[in-house]
Amino acid sequence: MADAEPQEPEATGGPPRRAVARFILLALILGAGFAALRFTPLRDQLTREALAATLTALRDAWWSPFLLGGLYLVLAPIGLPMSPLVFAGGMVFGFARGTLYNLGGLFVGAVASFLLARGLGHELIAHYLGERLKRVERMVGRQGFWAIVRVRLLPLPFALVNYGMAFAGVKLPAFLASTAAGLVPTTLLYTWIAATLANAAAGDRGEVARNALLAIAALALASLLPNFLSGVRRRQRYRDLKTRRGTRP
């Protein structure tokens, strides 16, 4: 009896090696950033107080806004909370300039995070999630621009939102537009709070107290705004559905 011919190994359907290598590189970048911020002296230099002191010392230098922007660019993709940078920008540069610099820095940091996750992680995520990820992409496409903006208004970690949009297949133009629109309300609010706190010592205590109450009210309004917009959208869809049913013969 003749020996059976050797069988070719069946394809395992595993992910492409390049996708695995890229995802490992992404994990290494995030892990190295976390370790540097957790176990090195950088941890003490990136608090709100330390950042404000550094930027205050360099405030008269023409390149100090670029330093703030560079910090956003480097620290946003590795998952550092952005609130210390936002508060430092508002406390050092004031409301008007601080808002401008914070918006620019947040936008640059968001784009860097999105492109990093898209380039290094999306292929492996798409391989394993397959049709489920496609359903998410279709759902995001149906929800439209303002649905993505609402995500920006939710109290979610900055890096998580950027990475989630990249993994979910949000297109770059939609990401850029929704990020630009979604960052404005909260950046204005937090920069204003920081600028108010910075002026508290020299200002009228009554005015500071009023500003603090207004800030609390604005924070509450910002936290409720996504649910309000979602409710408005649901009611509009319900009215449209009733109208379509009423016009049927």
Image (cartoon, grey):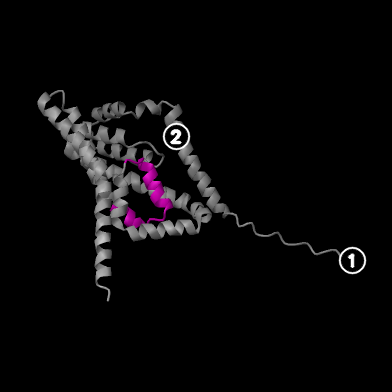
Type of amino acid at the residue the image marks with label 1: Met
Residue 93 can be seen, yes or no:
no
Q: Position of residue 75 (x, y in %)?
A: 37, 38
Tell whether 117 sits left or right of 124.
left
228 and 106: which one is in front? 228
Q: Residue furthest bottom?
A: 249
Between circles 1 and 2, the one closer to the viewer is 1
Q: Where 26 sits versus 46, above or below?
A: below
Residue 115 can be seen, yes or no:
yes
Residue drawn at (29%, 26%) of the image = 49
Looking at the rendered image, the quarter that the N terminus falls into is: bottom right
Tell whether 77 sits left or right of 9.
left
**Any magenta on residue 170?**
yes
Q: Residue beneath label 1, please?
A: 1
Chain part drawn in magenta:
155-178
Q: Position of residue 137 (x, y in %)?
A: 41, 58
Q: Residue furthest right?
A: 1
Count of marks, rendered view: 2
Q: Where 220 sits versus 179, above or below?
A: above
Residue drawn at (25%, 70%) of the image = 246
Residue drawn at (48%, 37%) of the image = 31
Q: Are marks 1 and 2 in contact (CB under 8 Å)?
A: no
Type of amino acid at the residue the image marks with label 2: Phe
Q: Position of residue 163 (x, y in %)?
A: 41, 47
**Any magenta on residue 237?**
no
Mark 2 burial class by Cα count in 10 Å: few <14, some 14-19, many 20+: some
